[in-house]
Image (tube, rainbow, N blue to C red):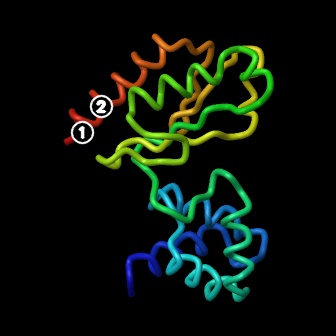
Amino acid sequence: MTEVKQLVKGLADQHGRTMESLLPILQGIVYQEQHISEDAMVEVAKELNISAAQVYGTATFYSFLHTKPLGKYVIRVCKTITCMMHGKNQIISELEGVLKIKLGETSHDGKFTLLETNCLGQCHKGPAMLINDVPYTDLTPEKVRDIIMSYRKKAISAN
């Protein structure tokens, strides 16, 4: 049994094999693998007895599900009007400069992916971003540099 097949089977055992199980299974794949590969989508379709098109449609609909590999640290910057009014564009410019990537790209070392996302629920503390599951608010360019430096140190110490 392949690793992907084993992962999907384990998630289906945990969440069930109904249509309602599709999203939790896809979330579990992203949690384990950082993205949902075509092979994983096919295995989910087989396990739930649904079409691969249904799996693909769900996997590509939600912004927190990914069908392409992402960096170890996925940075999502809130793109709402409130965050924009509080300096979101400066934050994105700073991140692009520090990481040497543009929105939608992953750094050459595979550590960081920079994305925009809809509301993070932090409008009162904008601009805001999320790195993996950790929210950061009241951002300034200086604060962003410090945050990225701390993640770079984590990446170095993890190696």
**In-image side of 33 versus 139 (left or right):** left
Horizontal and vertical percent position of residue 75: 52, 37
**In-image side of 157 versus 60 (left or right):** left
Q: Which numbered circle lies on residue 154?
A: 2
At label 1, counting other C-alpha atoms closer than 10 Å, the crowd grade (few under 14, some 14-19, many 20 or more) is few
Looking at the rendered structure, the kind of residue marked 2 is: Lys
Indicate the quadrant where residue 6 lies.
Answer: bottom left
**In-image side of 136 versus 20 (left or right):** left
At label 2, counting other C-alpha atoms closer than 10 Å, the crowd grade (few under 14, some 14-19, many 20 or more) is few
Which residue corresponds to the image point at 58% horizontal and 15% vertical from the top-left? 139
In this view, 137 is above or below 24: above
Q: Residue 114 or 138: which is nearer the viewer?
A: 114
In this view, 22 is above or below 117: below
In this view, 116 is above or below 140: below
Looking at the rendered structure, the kind of residue marked 1 is: Ala
Which residue corresponds to the image point at 39% horizontal and 27% vertical from the top-left? 98
Q: Which numbered circle lies on residue 158?
A: 1
Give the alpha-carbon distance from disc 1 to disc 2, as whole Å: 6 Å
Horizontal and vertical percent position of residue 78: 68, 31
The N terminus, quarter of image: bottom left
Indicate the quadrant where residue 67 lies.
Answer: bottom right
Q: Are marks 1 and 2 in contact (CB under 8 Å)?
A: yes
Regarding mark 1 in the picture, which secondary structure is present there? helix
Horizontal and vertical percent position of residue 147: 43, 21
**In-image side of 36 versus 16 (left or right):** left
Regarding mark 2 in the picture, which secondary structure is present there? helix
Which residue corresponds to the image point at 70% horizontal and 88% vertical from the top-left? 49
Q: Residue 91 or 26: which is nearer the viewer?
A: 91
